[in-house]
Amino acid sequence: MAERAAHVTMLQRSPTYIVARPSSDAVSAWLQRRLPASMAHRVTRWKNVLLGMYFYNLSRKKPELVKSNILKGVRAQLGPDYDIDKHFTPSYKPWDQRLCLVPDSDLFKSIRSGKASVVTDQIESFTETGLLLRSGERLDADVIVTATGLQLKVAGGMKIEVDGTPMNPAQAFMYKGMMYSDMPNLAVAMGYVNASWTLKAELSSTYVCRLINHMDAKGHAWCAPRRTDPASDEAPSLSLSSGYVQRASNILPKQGSKRPWKVHQNYLFDLMALKFGKVEDSEMAFGRAGTAAPANG
C-alpha cells in the first residue's frame, strides 16, 4: 500500500508580514575568510544591529514603502496567481506587530511544491475529522497542532513583595527598561521586540553588574528607582498591537516619555545608557542596611 504524501495546512485568523532571508550570512562568511575571527564577529554583529535598526526605523517612517517591498517579495516567491491579498497582507502596518522571518524561503518552497498550504479563516468548531471553519469550509486533519493563545508573564510570574506588602508591576514604571519603580534590588531581563532579545538582555546584565559593584564600593544595601516627576506622560512598556500583548496590558508595567523611564527599542541608546551612562542619577535612590527604601509619593 502506497503511503499518502504528508500535507501541512497553516490555519491563521489573519495574515502576518513574512520575510524570507538566507539562513547563512554571505557577508559574514566573506569577512571570516579575510579577517581574524574576533574582528569578523564584531563587524558582523554591528552590521546586523545597524541593518535591523535601519529597517525598523524605515518601517515606522515609511510603512507603505516597506509594506509594498515585503509583499513584492512574497509575490516573487509564490507567483502572480496566488492570493497574496488574502493570505499575506495584514491589516496593520509593518512592526505594529512583530515580523515573521522564514529561513531560505522554506515556507514558500513548501507552498510551491504542494506540501503546504495557507488558509485564512476562523475556527467554528472541532469535528470528528478535523475543523469546521466560520466560512463553512471543513479542514480534515490527522493531527492538529495549536500555536496561539500565548500568555505573557511579568518577572516569570513570581509574586513580588516589599517588606510584606504585595507589589503590582502594572502600577510600576520601567527604569532603563529593566527595573521597576519603588521595587528595591529587583532587575528583570526584558529584551527587544524589534531585534534579537539577547542584545538588550546582555546590556541589562552588564548594567546590573555595574550597579552591584557600585553598591558594594559605596556600602549600599539597596537601590530603588523612584519617579521624581509623576506628572510625566505614561504609555504601555510594549508598543505592539499583537493580541498577546493587548491581553497582558493589565499586568505589564508602564513607561514614561522621558529618560530613564522611556523604554527604547534602540540598541545604540541603550548601549550609551546602560554600558557607559552613570549609575547614580536623580531617579535612583540608594540606602544602607536598616534604612527603608522610599515609596513614591
Image (cartoon, rainbow, N blue to C red):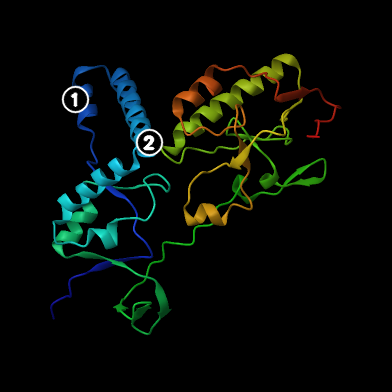
Residue appearing at x 69%, y 41% in the figure: 172
Where is residue 152 drawn, in percent x and y?
55, 52
Where is residue 66 drawn, in percent x and y?
29, 41
Instruction: Please indicate, yes or no, whether residue 45 appears anywhere in the rendered image.
Output: yes
Residue 216 placement, left or right of 278: right
Residue 235 placement, left or right of 92: right
Where is residue 139 drawn, in percent x and y?
30, 77
Taking depth in this image into account, of 156 and 99 the one nearest to the observer is 99
Residue appearing at x 85%, y 27% in the figure: 291
Mark 1: amino acid:
Trp
- The residue furthest right is 290
Instruction: Name the element at disc 2.
Output: helix
Instruction: Name the element at disc 1.
Output: helix
**Distance Cα–Cα, label 1 vs label 2:** 32 Å
Residue appearing at x 45%, y 32% in the figure: 199
Taking depth in this image into account, of 213 and 9 the one nearest to the observer is 9
Mark 1 vs mark 2: in front: 2
Residue appearing at x 22%, y 41% in the figure: 22
Marking on residue 30: 1
Mark 2: amino acid:
Lys
Disc 2 designates what residue?
A: 61
